[in-house]
Image (tube, rainbow, N blue to C red):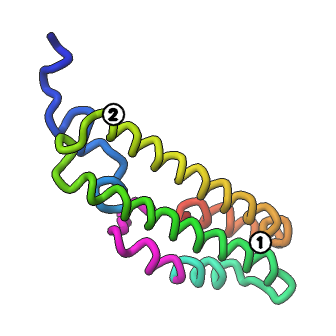
Amino acid sequence: GMMGQGMGPGMMGWDRMMPMMRGGMMMGPGMMMGPGMMGQHVEGRIAFLRAELGITPAQEAPWNAFAEALRASAQAMADMHGQMMPMMQGGPQAVPLPQRLELHERMMASHLEALRRVRAAAGPLYAALDDRQKRIADTLMMGMM
């Protein structure tokens, strides 16, 4: 029937998978990070956010906790990517459906844990920001994580 027709790479699979599983991670409009770049660029993102927010000495403690959460999240994503890529080298057909679903579930769980870690650190930082900094954070920070 219809189920088996047209189920090549363009349908429900390889090209529709999250970019990270194809070898990169979307960071914002038109920006993509490859496997080894996630950890490399986290320090640049952290420096950019710090400069744009104008973190003051009084905001150092919550800023440092937030920056550490970003680093830990980037490392977790790089680790997950490192685990998944060898399994996906032969394309999606090389990995049976149950294993692909398990990989996807693990990836989503890892993303959720990373998001929770960053959210927990973002709350105290956001509370320490002034109104100008909050406006900057509202526009910049979600696309940077």
Residue 132: numbered disc:
1
Is 122 placed left or right of 75 in the picture? right
> Which numbered disc flags the more N-terminal residue, 2 or 1?
2
Please say if 5 is above or below 17: above
Q: Where in the figure is residue 60, as x and y percent of width and height?
A: 79, 84
Residue, far top: 1
Say which element carries label 1.
Answer: helix
- Picture layout, residue 41 above or below residue 1: below
Query: Which region is colored magenta?
Result: 25-43
State yes or no: discs 2 and 1 in contact (Cβ < 8 Å): no
Residue 134 location, x and y as percent? 75, 66
The crowd level at tag 1 (other Cα within 10 Å; few <14, some 14-19, many 20+) is: few
Dividing the picture into quarters, in which one does residue 49 lie? Answer: bottom right
Q: Residue at x 64, y 85 (%)?
A: 51
Tell us which disc is closer to us: 2 or 1: 2
Q: Secondary structure at mark 2?
A: helix
Front residue of this view, candidates 15 and 135: 15
Picture quarter with the C terminus: bottom right
Q: Is residue 92 left or right of residue 82?
A: left
Percent position (x, y) of residue 87?
Answer: 27, 53
Residue 117: x %, y % from top left: 67, 60
Residue that mark 2 sits on: 98
